[in-house]
Amino acid sequence: MDSGNTYSVSNGKDTRTKDVAMSRREFCGAQLLGVVLFVVGLVGGILIGIYAYHGASYLEVVCKVG
């Protein structure tokens, strides 16, 4: 019964370290891309919120206090 946890070595070289290093690079790249997209979305949402609250430049917003 094969559990799928077997490793093979070809040409006398261990290829696992190269695969792991590439996986880490891809993982770090994906994390960095996720952070950048999150920041862009956050800034975009803030800018849209400011524009939606204040409207266009020709509209005046009157805030009533108490």
Image (spheres, rainbow, N blue to C red):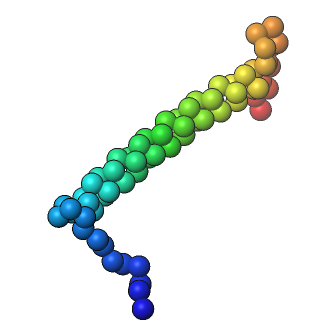
Q: Quadrant of the C terminus?
A: top right
Question: How many marks do you count on the picture?
Answer: 0
Residue 8 shown left or right of residue 56 in the figure: left
Q: Residue furthest front?
A: 11
* Quarter assignment of residue 60: top right
Image coords of residue 29 (percent x, y): 41, 43
Image coords of residue 42 (percent x, y): 58, 35
Image coords of residue 49 (percent x, y): 70, 30
Q: Residue furthest right?
A: 59
Residue placed most toward the observer, 65 or 26: 26
Image coords of residue 31 (percent x, y): 44, 46
Query: Looking at the picture, does residue 37 appear above or below residue 60?
Result: below
Q: Residue at left 40%, top 48%?
A: 26
Residue placed most toward the observer, 17 or 49: 17
Q: Quadrant of the N terminus?
A: bottom left
Query: Looking at the picture, does residue 42 appear above or below residue 57?
Result: below
Residue 28 shown left or right of residue 59 in the figure: left
Residue placed most toward the observer, 39 or 2: 2
For the question of whether residue 35 can be seen, the reply is no
Q: Residue furthest top?
A: 58
Residue 58 shown left or right of residue 39 in the figure: right
Residue placed most toward the observer, 39 or 34: 34
Q: Residue at left 81%, top 8%?
A: 58
Q: Residue at left 76%, top 26%?
A: 52
Q: Residue at left 41%, top 86%?
A: 2
Q: Residue furthest bottom?
A: 1
Query: Looking at the picture, does residue 7 appear above or below residue 65?
Result: below
For the question of whether residue 28 can be seen, the reply is yes
